[in-house]
Image (spheres, rainbow, N blue to C red):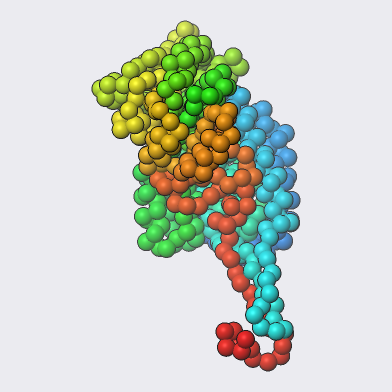
Amino acid sequence: MERLQNYIDGRWQAPASGRYDLDYDPATLNVVAEVPDSGPDDVDQAVAAARAAFESWRLVPAPRRGEMLFEAGRLLRERKEELARMMTRDMGKVLLEARGDVQEGIDMAFYMAGEGRRSFGYTTPSELADKFALAMRDPIGVAGIITPWNFPMAIPTWKVFPALVTGNTVVFKPASESPWLAYELVRIFEKVGVPAGVVNLIFGQGETTGEALVNHVGVDLISFTGSTDTGRRVATLAGQQLKRVSLELGGKNAVIVLDDADLELAVDGILWSAYGTTGQRCTACSRIIVQSGIYERLRERLIARMQNLRLGSGLDETVDVGPLVSEAALAKVERYVAIGRSEGARLDTGGDRWAAPDKTHGWFYLPTLFADVEPSMRIAREEIFGPVLSMIRVSSLDEAVTVNNGVTYGLSSSIFTRDVNQAFRAMRDLRTGIVYVNAGTTGAEIHLPFGGTRGTGNGHREAGIAALDFFTEWKSVYVDYSGRLQRAQIDT
Ligand code: NDP
């Protein structure tokens, strides 16, 4: 078992409280790490270090900053298998997906390393003679970064890499349920020579450590991914200081299947999106909206395939579905299954905990399908974040779009159809930040903008060049080389 430490101003150190929490493997319930239980004093120190380091880091040429990211990407790639195995033990996702999670970090490192030589601004003609006008990106200052447990490498790298390449310094608070990968990521920054104070790592509980970071006057911006309730609180607190905040929150993502869809392809896409990471991806599919003509065939095919999904420890390469991350997550799934039953939805398969034959006691739940779900039911509107799928019947594409758009979230949606006209109508009308055609609701690539509409966030996007917009301030510069006073709007 490893004892993790905070990383402040280039030094690994114990929390001021001297206390540690325990981090469990959700498949075996063995303790994998001891994690600092930090508090406001540790946050103060980390913010002071990041503030001091900002003045020199912002002056390091951006291509040099990018090279450090490139080196970090190289080390991530070298350690990919080891890190993936740690991730599976830390939070339960199966090895195949843990490798994908680390790969997202590698991709983001190389992509953002390139931004060290791009980060384009622009020049534009002035309305006055002998005058030059340009717009350039400026770093903002200290970035507070707060992440959830479900993508322990991908989400931190989506935030920390663009923050660093654009010249900001970082105080990073990872989720308590998956601390290990955050620790390893910061060790990589140390190894590639990121200067002291530029990246600081603070472990601790959200309500104390996380909130201290959000409230700290020395933090200029907060990049947050997590639940909608916490996001609302973060935005409220940060708003009191007019602090810039990006929020990536919950989802209630749907796959639409039209009568003319390729049935087997749709089933593959649904299973991967709904039960991958045990339904705990922010883009997980938790509703399928199915046209009447294909409804029964799809239902039967899904049930048959679901009953062949293998549960168990994600370290076993033959396993499809790992455990839920915590006892609280398992209890939430149980609550929603009870709600679905009481609302009158038909439980087709699943609906119970699962115990491994070798009597290991992880937090497992059977892949679950509810059919005959009405769009107004709570199981069709609220985020469950577990392996529970609701099947809704519709008569047309228009009705499917209305049902899809009828929830408060807007992260991801997908449509299976062979009709190009229907596909383009869906692309136009689905009100989510991400739309897939003939694929499930997951599978974002790191060079495209990522984020949701409406209740999924507050309008910012991560990844791609969109990420640079959040971590930089636009500065407009006017250079007058006429040698006389020229007045815009007056002397034109
Ligand atoms: P939480 O909101 O509980 O936690 C997210 C992070 O916020 C954790 O680091 C947590 O710390 C911290 N935190 C908790 N309370 C506070 C607070 N008052 N102030 C500051 N920080 C706080 O979410 P989960 O970890 O449960 O993650 C699951 C959620 O994340 C789901 O709703 C999912 O949809 C969403 N998500 C969204 C994504 C997107 O891009 N849209 C991507 C991935 C997940 P601690 O762990 O110590 O509680």
**In which quadrant is the N terminus drawn?**
top right
Name which residue lies at 42% across and 33% down. Answer: 400
**In which quadrant is the C terminus drawn?**
bottom right
Decide which of 184, 385 is in the foreground and name it: 385
Tell me if residue 342 comes above or below residue 195 in the rendering. Answer: above
Tell me if residue 274 comes above or below residue 207 in the rendering. Answer: above
Report which quarter residue 363 is drawn in: top left
Toward the left, the furthest residue is 342
Q: Is residue 180 visible?
A: no
Report which quarter residue 346 is drawn in: top left
Q: How many marks?
A: 0
Name which residue lies at 34% across and 31% down. Answer: 375
Q: In the shown orientation, is residue 383 left or right of residue 278? A: left
Name which residue lies at 64% across and 80% down. Answer: 127
**Where's residue 354, x and y in %?**
42, 14
**Figure quarter occupied by ligand 1:** top left
**Where's residue 468, x and y in %?**
60, 55
Report which quarter residue 342 is drawn in: top left
Q: In the shown orientation, is residue 170 left or right of residue 338? A: right
Toward the top, the furthest residue is 357
Decide which of 210, 125 is in the foreground and name it: 125
Name which residue lies at 63% across and 29% down. Answer: 99
**Where's residue 350, x and y in %?**
40, 15
**Where's residue 22, x and y in %?**
45, 31
Tell me if residue 424 comes above or below residue 136 in the rendering. Answer: above
Q: Is residue 110 visible?
A: yes
